[in-house]
Image (cartoon, grey):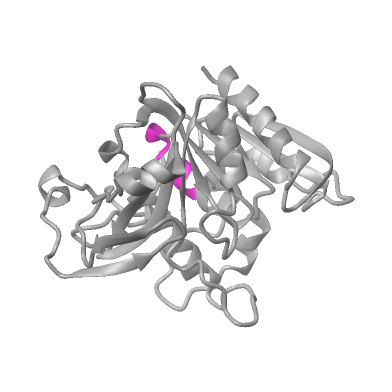
């Protein structure tokens, strides 16, 4: 049983489940169905201009038919946490859904669209893919790690919670078959969330996950998530695959992910020869092929 830390929970947003909290926050249909405020602001996108509510309720999703028409299988969606929008998009296979769905938790400061190639590849194999941009994705001028990495990770956990809480509003999503894909720092975030909410996640795909970052996690605010990651991962009973490359975090250290592999009760491990931390080009397709094979084996 996962212990959860005491924390202050907003009435309208799912907060990160922590190392010691008493109960998971709930979002009711009444809360989610609140009518958006009349005040509107405009968001510029690559496809077209989209008008969105300034303060939509939790789980409120906006899609624009012109974007859907222009982008084919991809449409823009918005999720909400604490009245702030989380920009995203969903790419769905052709045909009638709902579809098995992969949610991508991106690497540090990665912009929306960084994983579009993988979204298309997964979609071609029958999976819907949700990409989104963490609210704190804008990099500082020096592009350094955040000063208070612990607080930063907690904010991303909350964002991913909001996305998961909103899946019931997306008819394309088969909520009995939802997978988390986490790359780099996003792999660390996905590992926390998959462990805390494993009843809602079918499997976990980790691509060069940054577990080492837990040693760097400092907090300006009250610490609300454990930095002792490996004992926590032992609680994750869903199947996991870790994918790395010989030119990535793995480098020349074949034991780089040993602790994580031992911690997860059900963990598969794959190394792609020559792949670096970005996993672009041919390595990107290999990641998709390997992870699809794993997901099929999970049932």
Report the residue that reaches farthest toward the right. 252
> Is residue 96 found left or right of 195 in the rendered image?
left
State the predominant SS element of the stretch in magenta.
Answer: helix
Q: Is residue 21 above or below residue 71?
A: below
Q: Tell whether position 193 is magenta.
A: yes
Whether residue 153 can be seen here: yes
Q: In which quarter of the image is residue 221?
A: bottom left
Q: Is residue 86 above or below residue 181?
A: below
Residue 200 image position (x, y, % from top left): 38, 34
Q: Which residue is drawn at 38% across and 41% down?
A: 69
Q: Which residue is drawn at 21% across and 60% down?
A: 56
Magenta residues span: 192-200
> Is residue 55 found left or right of 144 in the rendered image?
left
Q: Residue at x 79, y 44 (%)?
A: 245
> Is residue 38 found left or right of 209 in the rendered image?
left
Q: Tell whether position 244 is magenta.
A: no
Residue 88 image position (x, y, % from top left): 41, 52
Q: Which residue is drawn at 65% across and 33% down?
A: 288
Between 250 and 91, the one lying in front of the other is: 91
Between 139 and 5, the one lying in front of the other is: 139
Q: Is residue 34 above or below residue 103?
A: below
Q: Quadrant of residue 73?
A: top left
Whether residue 7 can be seen here: no
Q: In which quarter of the image is the N terminus?
A: top left
Q: In this view, does 94 lie above or below 27?
A: above
Residue 102 image position (x, y, % from top left): 49, 36
Residue 151 image position (x, y, % from top left): 46, 69
- Count of marks placed on residues: 0
């Amino acid at each position: 049983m996962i212990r959860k830390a005491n924390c202050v929970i907003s009435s309208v947003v799912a907060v990160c489940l922590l190392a010691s909290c008493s109960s998971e926050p709930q979002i009711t249909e009444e809360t989610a169905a609140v009518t958006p405020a009349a005040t509107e602001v405009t968001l510029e996108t690559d496809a077209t201009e989209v008008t969105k509510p300034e303060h939509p309720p939790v789980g409120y999703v906006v899609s624009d038919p012109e974007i859907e028409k222009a982008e084919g299988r991809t449409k823009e969606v918005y999720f909400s946490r604490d009245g702030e929008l989380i920009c995203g998009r969903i790419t769905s296979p052709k045909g009638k859904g709902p579809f098995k769905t992969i949610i991508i938790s991106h690497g540090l400061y990665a912009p929306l669209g960084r994983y579009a190639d993988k979204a298309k590849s997964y979609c071609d194999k029958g999976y819907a893919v949700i990409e989104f941009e963490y609210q704190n994705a804008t990099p500082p001028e020096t592009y350094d790690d955040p000063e208070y990495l612990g607080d930063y990770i907690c904010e991303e956990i909350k964002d991913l919670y909001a996305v998961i809480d909103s899946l019931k509003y997306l008819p394309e999503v088969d909520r009995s078959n939802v997978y988390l894909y986490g790359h780099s720092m996003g792999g660390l975030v996905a590992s926390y969330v998959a462990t805390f909410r494993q009843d809602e996640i079918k499997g976990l795909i980790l691509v060069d996950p940054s577990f080492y970052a837990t040693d760097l996690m400092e907090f300006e605010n009250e610490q609300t998530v454990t930095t002792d990651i490996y004992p926590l991962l032992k609680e994750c009973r869903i199947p996991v695959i870790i994918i790395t490359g010989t030119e990535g975090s793995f480098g020349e250290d074949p034991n780089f992910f040993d602790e994580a592999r031992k911690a997860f009760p059900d963990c598969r491990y794959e190394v792609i020869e020559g792949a670096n931390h970005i996993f672009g080009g041919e390595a990107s397709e290999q990641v998709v092929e390997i992870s699809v094979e794993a997901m099929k084996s999970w049932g």
